[in-house]
C-alpha cells in the first residue's frame, strides 16, 4: 500500500490496513500495545483523501479518550490532512459549545469528534452524535468496544441505534471476549446487523450457548452452562476482523508506553487548587528553596491525587477518588498476568482489596515493606508459576523494584509513581529482563493538568526530578 504516512506502520499494522481500509464494517482485535489506534487514524486519513468521508467520530472510555487528543491524533494523523478536532463535554462552557457546533459548519477540513462512551448513557450525547452522523459522510469507531458488550446497557442501545447513520464503522479492542463468546453479539451488531445473522440477542444466545432454565422460589432465570458452534462463530466474524497479539509482532519496540487518564472528583479538584496555592505561598516565603522543601509540597499534592492526605497527627484521611475504578477499567482490557506498582502502602492495601473483591482472594500477591521475607519469596514464586493465579503482583518500587524477576507479566501498571528516576527504571526492568518472551507495555495512571502528569513526563524523559525543581523550577511544577 503506497500512502504518505506520518509514522511508518509496522508490518502487522500495514496488513490490518490492507484488509480493512475500504470496508464499511471492520474490527481491529489487536492486543494493547500493538498500535490499533494508529491503524484507525491511517484508515480515517485514507478514506478522507479518497473523498469517502469528511467526519470521524471516535468513542472511547473516559480513561482513554483524552489520549486520542493529546497523543494519538497529533502523532499519527498525516501532515497533509487538515483537521478540525474537538472534544465532547457534557456541560460545555460557551466557548466549548461553540467549538462543538463548528463541527456542523461547511469546511474542507476533516472534522473529528472525540467523545467518551459514558456520554451515550444519556440522551444528550446520543442526540448530538446522531445529528452529526446524519448531516455528514462519517466514520464512527469505538475504542475498547467491550464497553458495549452488555445488550441491556443504555449506552449500548444508543450506539446500536445510531451506528447505521455512519458510512463506515470500526471497533477496536485487544480482547473482544472478556467473559464469554456471547460478548461478540453487540460488538458485531454495531458494525453490521447482517454479519452474525441474528436479529435478537436471545436467538444468538440460544444458538451458541447451552441454556438451562433455573428456578429459585418464585424467581426463574436462564443459566448458561456451556458453549457450542464456536467454529461457526469464528467463521462468521473472520472476514470482518483482524487479530494480532504482541508476541506475534516481532518488529515492535521491546518497551511500549501508554497513559490512562484519571479525572479528579469535585472534592479532589477543589482541594488540589487550595493545596497548590498554599504550597506556592509556603515556598515563596522561604529565603532558600531546597529540593527537599519542594518535594515535601509536591508529595502532599501527589498523595491527594492518589486518594488520601495526612493530617497534623499523621493520620491518613481518605478522599473520594476515581483511581481504583480507572485501574479496574484498564485491567478489564487486558489478558494474562499484570504487575501493579504503587508508591504508597495505603494505595497498595486498597488495590489488593479491590482486586480480591473482583477476581477472588487467590488472584493477587502483594510485596512491600511490611511483607515478611517468607511471603516475599512465595509471592514471587507463585506469580512466576505457569498457573493462572495469582494474576496480579502489587508492590511498591522501593521494596520490590530491585533484583527480582517478574517476567510472567507483559503488562505493567503504574498506579502511582515514585519521584525517583532510578526506582522507575529498576521497576520497569522487573518484567523486561531475561526470561521475558513478549514485548512489555507500561501504563501510567495520570491526572491531566496536575503534577501527576509532570512526574510521568519527567520520568519517561529520564530526568532527575530533584534537579528539575531546584531554584525557581518549583514554580513551573506548581503552575
Image: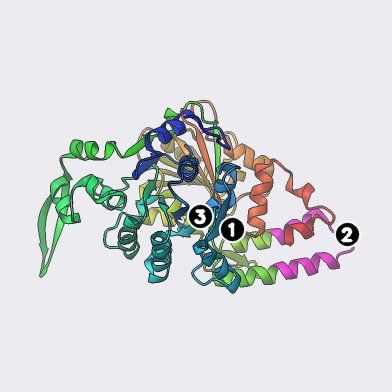
* Figure check: 234 above or below 88: above
Q: Earlier in the sequence, mark 1 or mark 2?
A: 2
What is the magenta segment's predominant secondary structure? helix
The magenta stretch spans residue 27:
no
Range shown magenta: 276-298
- In the image, taking residue 420 as reference, residue 6 lies left or right, namely left
* Residues at circles 1 and 2 in contact by the CB criterion of under 8 Å: no
Between 208 and 23, the one lying in front of the other is: 23
Q: Which mark is residue 162?
A: none
Q: Earlier in the sequence, mark 1 or mark 3?
A: 3
* Residues at circles 3 and 2 in contact by the CB criterion of under 8 Å: no
Q: Element at badge 1?
A: loop
Quadrant of the rendering where the C terminus is positioned: bottom right
Query: Which residue was labeled with disc 3?
Result: 112
Query: Which residue was labeled with disc 2?
Result: 288
Residue drawn at the location 72% of the way across and 43% of the way down:
463
Task: Give residue 171's position: percent from left, percent from top.
Answer: 38, 47
Q: Residues within 10 Å of mark 2 (few under 14, many from 20)?
A: few
Query: Which residue was labeled with disc 1?
Result: 447
Residue drawn at the location 73% of the way across and 61% of the way down:
478
Select label 3 or label 2 by which is in front: 3
Q: Residues within 10 Å of mark 1 (few under 14, many from 20)?
A: many
Q: Element at badge 3?
A: strand
Question: In this orientation, does residue 312 appear?
Answer: no
Between 148 and 44, the one lying in front of the other is: 44
Q: Earlier in the sequence, mark 3 or mark 2?
A: 3
- CA gap, disc 1 and disc 2: 30 Å
Select label 1 or label 2 by which is in front: 1
- In the image, taking residue 410 as reference, residue 288 lies left or right, namely right
Amino acid at each position: 500500500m503506497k500512502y504518505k504516512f506520518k509514522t511508518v506502520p509496522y508490518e502487522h499494522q500495514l496488513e490490518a490496513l490492507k484488509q480493512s481500509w475500504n470496508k464499511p464494517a471492520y474490527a481491529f482485535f489487536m492486543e494493547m500495545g500493538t498500535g490499533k489506534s494508529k491503524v484507525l487514524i491511517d484508515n480515517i486519513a485514507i478514506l478522507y483523501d479518497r473523498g469517502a468521508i469528511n467526519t470521524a467520530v471516535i468513542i472511547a472510555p473516559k480513561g482513554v479518550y483524552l489520549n486520542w487528543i493529546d497523543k494519538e491524533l497529533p502523532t499519527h494523523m498525516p501532515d497533509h490532512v487538515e483537521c478540525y478536532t474537538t472534544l465532547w463535554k457534557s456541560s460545555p462552557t460557551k466557548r466549548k459549545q461553540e467549538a462543538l457546533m463548528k463541527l456542523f459548519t461547511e469546511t474542507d477540513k476533516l472534522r473529528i469528534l472525540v467523545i467518551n462512551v459514558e456520554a451515550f448513557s444519556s440522551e444528550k450525547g446520543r442526540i448530538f452524535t446522531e445529528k452529526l452522523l446524519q448531516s455528514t459522510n462519517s466514520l464512527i469507531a469505538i475504542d475498547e468496544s467491550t464497553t458495549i458488550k452488555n445488550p441491556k446497557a443504555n449506552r449500548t442501545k444508543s450506539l446500536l441505534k445510531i451506528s447505521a447513520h455512519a458510512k463506515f464503522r470500526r471497533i477496536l479492542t485487544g480482547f473482544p471476549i472478556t467473559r464469554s463468546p456471547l460478548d461478540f453479539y453487540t460488538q458485531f451488531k454495531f458494525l453490521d446487523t447482517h454479519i452474525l445473522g441474528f436479529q435478537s440477542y436471545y436467538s444468538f444466545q440460544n444458538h451458541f450457548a447451552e441454556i438451562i432454565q433455573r428456578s429459585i422460589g418464585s424467581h426463574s432465570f436462564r443459566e448458561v452452562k456451556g458453549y457450542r458452534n464456536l467454529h461457526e462463530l469464528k467463521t462468521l466474524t473472520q472476514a470482518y476482523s483482524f487479530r494480532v497479539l504482541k508476541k506475534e509482532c516481532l518488529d515492535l519496540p521491546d518497551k511500549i508506553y501508554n497513559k490512562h487518564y484519571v479525572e479528579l472528583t469535585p472534592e479532589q479538584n477543589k482541594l488540589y487548587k487550595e493545596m497548590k496555592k498554599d504550597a506556592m505561598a509556603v515556598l515563596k516565603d522561604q529565603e532558600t528553596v531546597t529540593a527537599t522543601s519542594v518535594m515535601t509540597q509536591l508529595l502532599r499534592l501527589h498523595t491527594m491525587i492518589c486518594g488520601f492526605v495526612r493530617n497534623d497527627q499523621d493520620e491518613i484521611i481518605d478522599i473520594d477518588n476515581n483511581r481504583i475504578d480507572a485501574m479496574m477499567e484498564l485491567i478489564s482490557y487486558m489478558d494474562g498476568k499484570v504487575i501493579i506498582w504503587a508508591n504508597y502502602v495505603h494505595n497498595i492495601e486498597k488495590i489488593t482489596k479491590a482486586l480480591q473483591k473482583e477476581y477472588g482472594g487467590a488472584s493477587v500477591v502483594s510485596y512491600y515493606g511490611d511483607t515478611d521475607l517468607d511471603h516475599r519469596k512465595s509471592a514471587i514464586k507463585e506469580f512466576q508459576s505457569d498457573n493462572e493465579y495469582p494474576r496480579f503482583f502489587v508492590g511498591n518500587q522501593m521494596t520490590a523494584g530491585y533484583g527480582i524477576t517478574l517476567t510472567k507479566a507483559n503488562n505493567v501498571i503504574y498506579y502511582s509513581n515514585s519521584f525517583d528516576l532510578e526506582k522507575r527504571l529498576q521497576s520497569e526492568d522487573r518484567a523486561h529482563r531475561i526470561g521475558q518472551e513478549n514485548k512489555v507495555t507500561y501504563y501510567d495512571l495520570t491526572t491531566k493538568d496536575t503534577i501527576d502528569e509532570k512526574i510521568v513526563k519527567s520520568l519517561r524523559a529520564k530526568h532527575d526530578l530533584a534537579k528539575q525543581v531546584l531554584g525557581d523550577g518549583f514554580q513551573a511544577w506548581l503552575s
